[in-house]
Amino acid sequence: MNYSSVEGPILERNVPELMSRLPPRVAAGSRLHGLEPGELVKLHHSLAESLDCTHGVIAQFVAPEPDATIEAVVYDLAYVSAAWLDKRVLFVNGTGMRFDMKEHTAVRRQEPVPAREFDIDDIEASITRVVGLELYQLTFPSMQGALNLAPTLRRMPEFLDRLRDSFDMVVIASPPASAAPMGVLLSPFVDGNILVLEAGRTRAPVAMELRDSLSASGGAVVGTVLTHYQSPIPRFLRRWL
């Protein structure tokens, strides 16, 4: 699936370029999440095949509990897809998409205070490109102090459709479900949701609860990524098992 010739509304303008603040390459054993480059390639192909869309694929990664490596997992997947597989990829860092309930309550006491809406057009304008790659980055702002999410969510399908027209794949790193509901709220608007579970830490009932919440919200759960997995079998022997 290669849409490198597609020029959508986002890429018709000049996108600022920047040097990535994350490591410029992915090497076996170099990442704390424990996923090898080959495993990331397989993950890319699995998503592309299982989410067979007319336009670009949009996948959301969400963990049930705080996972310090989810941002790195999704970024590395985006990097491998762009640098190794020659795809046009957008990495969306949505780990900050949360709002503080204490601030929410405090603001409500001060009447009248108009609800502040996040302008999706402004968010789209913040897309930047990693130098030398068809890899783009977008950081969603914190929802701290946002009293009215409904207008933003109503525009989300339109916004994601524009992303589909501009990128082969869009991968979203969402905040943990225990900290914010944003992953569940976004789940119906993406093509597939992937659970990010930590080996030896994430409990099965917690993972199943998140899976059921995503499904109940209308989102499709298409797979699971297991991080920090330590196997006693050497890596060079696993391919034969």
Image (cartoon, rainbow, N blue to C red):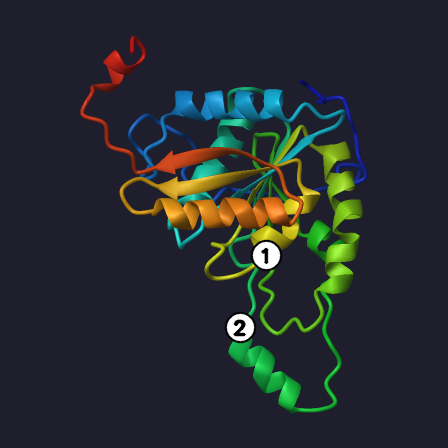
Residue 196 located left or right of residue 54: left
For the residue carrying disc 2, how many other residues have a C-alpha within 10 Å: few (<14), some (14-19), or many (20+)? some
Residues at marks 1 and 2, CA–CA distance in whole angstroms: 13 Å
Q: Secondary structure at mark 2?
A: loop
Q: Secondary structure at mark 1?
A: helix
Identify the residue at horizontal 56%, vertical 59% (top origin).
181
Disc number for residue 182 = 1
For the residue carrying disc 1, how many other residues have a C-alpha within 10 Å: few (<14), some (14-19), or many (20+)? many
Tell which of 121 and 157 is nearer to you. Answer: 157
Q: Amino acid at mark 1?
A: Met
Identify the residue at horizontal 47%, vertical 62% (top origin).
179
Residue 222 located left or right of residue 154: left
Residue 30, given in percent of the width and then of the height, sits at 30, 33
* Count of marks placed on residues: 2
Disc number for residue 25 = none
Disc number for residue 100 = 2
Q: Is residue 239 above or below residue 86?
A: above
Identify the residue at horizontal 77%, vertical 46% (top origin).
157
Residue 65 located left or right of residue 74: left
**Quadrant occupied by the N terminus:** top right
Q: Is residue 155 visible?
A: yes
Q: Is residue 65 above or below residue 38?
A: below
Which of the 4 image quadrants contains residue 149?
A: bottom right
Q: Amino acid at mark 2?
A: Asp
Residue 62, given in percent of the width and then of the height, sits at 50, 46
